[in-house]
Image: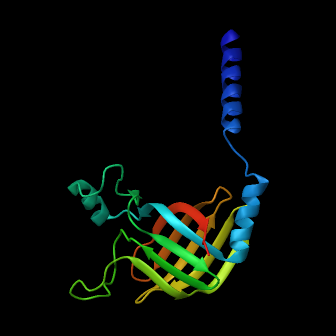
């Protein structure tokens, strides 16, 4: 009997402890995110790149070329310049790409593999989710490729971004969103 009571007590304390670690967004955080999305004026600086794992990426990890602290499915972008800026309907970006390119677009090494946008977006859609986060989706075009972009913005000003190109495997980036300084 004492064992059963101890088990029930332990499980109850475990669930109480787990629930106490969940933090709800403050009204200030929600208001800041609402304003960023309404103004369509923000910059995302990614901290991690998460490529789709395939044989090529796994071989890269086996070769020892991936930096310490990273692995084949999660590559640190610390110290690597990267950003995605959205100002109105204009997007600019320079994001490193890790993954498999299905159809090369440059010859003789003339094309780097980064994802670079500089132009207008199409089919811009915003959805506010139940947890006060936003899902933003749009189409963007780089020099030689079209992308479907989906961005999740959270009240904590964290971001989760997925880019699907016509010639590349999808890649996911996580990072932080900030207001573009005027």
- Point out the residue furthest to the top here: 2
Q: Is residue 180 left or right of residue 65?
A: right
* Residue 70: image location, x then y, percent: 36, 53
Could you tell me if residue 131 is visible in this image?
A: no
- Point out the residue furthest to the front here: 182
Q: Nearest the camera: 150 or 9? A: 150
Q: Is residue 61 left or right of residue 164?
A: left
**Residue 60, image quadrant:** bottom left
**Quadrant containing the N terminus in the rendered view:** top right
- The residue under the point 24% across, 89% down is 107
Could you tell me if residue 21 is visible in this image?
A: yes
* Residue 7: image location, x then y, percent: 66, 20
Q: Is residue 41 left or right of residue 94?
A: right
- The residue under the point 65% across, 13% down is 3
* Residue 169: image location, x then y, percent: 41, 73
**Residue 158, image quadrant:** bottom right
**Quadrant containing the C terminus in the rendered view:** bottom right
* Residue 103: image location, x then y, percent: 33, 84
- The residue under the point 23% across, 83% down is 109
Depicted 7 relative to depicted 56: above or below = above
Depicted 84 relative to depicted 45: above or below = below
Q: Nearest the camera: 103 or 118? A: 118
Depicted 82 relative to depicted 176: above or below = below
Depicted 11 relative to depicted 170: above or below = above
């Amino acid at each position: 009997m004492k064992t059963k009571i101890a088990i029930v007590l332990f499980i109850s304390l475990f669930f109480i402890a787990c629930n106490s670690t969940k933090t709800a967004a403050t009204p200030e955080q929600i208001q800041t995110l609402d304003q960023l999305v309404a103004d369509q004026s923000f910059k995302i600086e990614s901290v991690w790149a998460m490529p789709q794992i395939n044989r090529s990426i796994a071989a890269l990890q086996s070769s020892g070329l991936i930096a310490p602290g990273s692995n084949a499915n999660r590559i640190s972008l610390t110290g690597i310049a990267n950003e995605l800026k959205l100002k109105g309907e204009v997007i600019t970006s320079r994001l490193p790409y890790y993954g498999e390119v299905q159809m090369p677009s440059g010859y003789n090494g003339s094309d780097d593999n980064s994802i670079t946008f500089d132009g207008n977006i199409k089919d811009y859609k915003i959805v506010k989710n139940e947890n006060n986060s936003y899902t933003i989706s749009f189409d963007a075009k780089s020099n030689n490729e079209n992308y479907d972009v989906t961005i999740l913005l959270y009240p904590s000003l964290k971001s989760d971004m997925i880019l699907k190109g016509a010639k590349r495997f999808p890649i996911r980036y996580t990072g932080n969103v900030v207001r573009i300084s005027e």
